[in-house]
Amino acid sequence: MIDNSIITLEEKSIENNISFLRASYGGKVKISAVVKANAYGHGIEQIVPIFEKYGIDHFSVFYYSEAVRVFNCLAKPTSIMVMGWLADDDLNDAIQKGIEFFVFNLERLKKAIDYAKNLDLKAKIHLEVETGMNRSGLDFNELEEAMDLIKDNLSFLEISGFCTHLAGAESISNHYRIQNQLQKYQEMFANFQAQDLSPKYKHVANSAASFVYPEARMDLVRVGIMIYGFWSSTEVFIKYVNHQNIKTDPLKRILRWTSQIMAIKEVKSGEFIGYGISYLAQTNIITALVPVGYSMGYSRSLSNKGRVLIRGYRCSVIGVVNMNMMIIDITNVKHAEIGDEVVLIGKQRKLEIKVSAFSDLSDELNYEILAHLPENISRRVIKK
Ligand SMILES: *Cc1c(COP(=O)(O)O)cnc(C)c1O
């Protein structure tokens, strides 16, 4: 565990976001909490038990290894869904543990049937259909073949879901494409139903789609970014506030990332600071060294651009972000001392560093910044 910085997670915000989502979707829609990428950087082992405490009983991941981590930190048997990569070597284990997985081609379906037969158990599958994203999923013809295989092997399969993924619901520019996808999904589902097959859950929506296209909620929503307190895009947020006529953000960020001042230095006017010539002191300035760099998830593209909070002041990153350190201009901070808290993400007194602000500065999406937070930073939950 690395203690140069710490991530704290606010239980109260988790409760807030879950109850907001529940109230918005209504009681009939199941929430699947997406906890891929180490729970969007928040930490699977810390987040999953709290989600469970507030009633989440369906989890989505990308890798099988993440599914096993979720499995190991759950108190009760709960649905876990692998939306992506599952090696053949892990199929036995997945079927035995009752972990559900996407079937996105015929090869995967045949393997699932073979392994389930061998174990004399049912594989829990979600049929993913190709509706226009052209990434993964069964097309019309493959679905026909898949349905024949399924009907012949119903004692070894549980159809947990019939699903697809939409190509960018967070942006209005994709509106036409998404409408087409939703229509194609319904046509494919009609074919499926015509064969007397029915899934436990129909699902297509991520966070953005669940708000922009309420009809896309169906039986289950795969919510990632919003459960952590972030809107998928400014567009989705504006659409929501305009529609509801509210002024404040109903979501609350869960995560705060802080470090501390490691050293303080006075630098004379005319001196370069850090590597190379990327920052030249224009006056006499005072700098603080912070032991966080790009190897810790603080992007190098924030060189000379990033902002942090120290003693309630907003301060600039100066020079290039190093592998393990960065330098901050603290000339205007009164009484800064070694050991002072440095907020990299989150609130301090009246100010806040938002992940969305990083995206404005560096081209990195909020998703990307969160996913880059290393797993070996210590994480602590602030209990309610
Ligand atoms: C990541 C992912 C989601 C969640 O997306 P958010 O925008 O974070 O809500 C949903 N479905 C699939 C298939 C995903 O890969």
Image (cartoon, grey):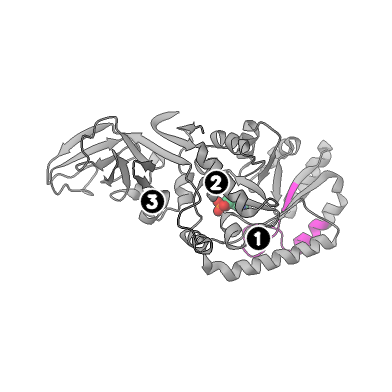
Q: Height in image: 111 above or below 8?
A: below
Among the 4 quarters of the image, the one containing residue 49: top right
Question: Residue tagged by mark 2?
Answer: 17
User: What amino acid type is highlighted by mark number 1?
Assistant: Ala
**Mark 1 C-beta closer than 8 Å to ligand 1:** no
Tell me if residue 347 can be seen: yes
| Quadrant occupied by the N terminus | top left
Identify the mark nearer the N-term, 1 or 3. 1
Measured as percent of width and height from the top left, residue 217 is found at 66, 57
Classed neighbour count for the residue bearing mark 2: other residues with Cα under 10 Å, few (<14), some (14–19), many (≥20): many
- Relative placement, left or right, of 58 versus 361 is right
- Relative placement, left or right, of 33 versus 197 is left
Among the 4 quarters of the image, the one containing residue 332: top left
Nearer-the-camera pick, 106 or 150: 150
Q: What secondary structure is found at the residue carrying circle 1?
A: helix
Classed neighbour count for the residue bearing mark 3: other residues with Cα under 10 Å, few (<14), some (14–19), many (≥20): many
Which stretch appears magenta?
Answer: 125-147
User: What amino acid type is highlighted by mark number 2?
Assistant: Asn
Q: Please report contact status of discs 1 and 3: CB closer than 8 Å, yes or no.
A: no
146 within the magenta span: yes
Measured as percent of width and height from the top left, residue 320 is found at 29, 46
Nearer-the-camera pick, 30 or 302: 30
